Amino acid sequence: SAEIRSLEAQNTDHVAVLEDCIDFSLAKTGSEIEEKLDKGCLPDCLDDDIIPNVGNEIGAEAQIRFLKAKLHVMQEELDSLASECRKKDDENQSLKSRLKDTEEEKTRLQRTISVQQSQNEKYKMLSQEANKKSEGLQQEVIALGKELEHLKRVQKQAATSQSATEVRLNRALEEAERYKVELNKLKQSNKDVVNQELKAIEELKTENKKLQKEKGELIAGFKKQLKLIDILKRQKVRTQ
């Protein structure tokens, strides 16, 4: 989705910054300063944040020891920050992988729902055709009923044809019953199929909602990680 692509782009930018932060080191600068300190020379410019004003009142050797200790602490803090940045980068990669898996699962479920809906439409059309056929059979039953009444009247009028009329009557009743049984079977079969498909679609929709919720939670966690990276970056700048 557009939101995930935007987050991935932001993550790429932050990862690039993190890599720059990790690659950047005070080793060279620290070595140069430490070399000067070992020679008994103080740096050309000392910030009051590094050595307070009272530093002017202490000897050069004490200032050198203080600067060495300060440099060692700053290097440890930088190494710790770089390690934390790498750790957060690994966590972000894991979140990206989970987001990708969730998106793929969502796509698969959407395809499944589409297929199920297509099949449901097909069964709906079959049900409509069955209803039309049922209406036709009902009309036939009505026609047979009318014919039965007619045969009854003919039976009264023609006693000589009573046997033949009874045969037609029984045959008509059997046909009507057979049509009725077939109609009931067809209705029940279509009803069961439609109910099963509707149930399957509801289950898929429920699963899709669950995945959407997980996706939102992952995105929220992803944003928190990005915010933490920005905080770590600002801490590094202040440390420098």
Image (cartoon, helix red, strand yellow):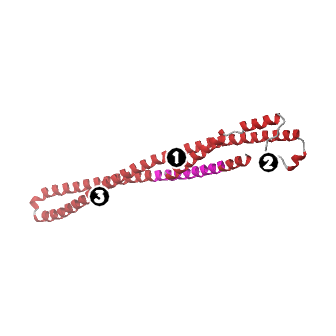
Q: Residues within 10 Å of mark 3 (few under 14, many from 20)?
A: some
> Which residue is identified by label 2?
47
Three-letter amino acid code at disc 1? Answer: Thr
What segment is highlighted magenta in the picture?
Answer: 202-229
Residue 11, relative to residue 29: is it above or below?
A: below
Q: Position of residue 214 (x, y in %)?
A: 56, 50
Closest to the camera, between mark 3 and mark 2, is: 2
Give the farthest residue toward the front.
44
Q: Are marks 1 and 3 in contact (CB under 8 Å)?
A: no
As for residue 209 lying within the magenta part, the answer is yes
Q: Is residue 51 left or right of residue 95?
A: right
Reading the image, the residue beneath label 3 is 131
Tell which circle, 1 or 2, labels the residue nearer the N-terminal end.
2
Residue type indicated by callout 3? Asn
- Residue 145, percent from left and from top: 21, 62
Tell me the quadrant of the picture where the C terminus can be found: top right
Q: Is residue 126 left or right of residue 29?
A: left
Q: Provide the residue designation for mark 1.
A: 102
Estimate the x, y position of residue 180 in percent, counting from the top left. Answer: 27, 56
Amino acid type for the residue under numbered disc 2: Asp
Image quarter for residue 173? bottom left
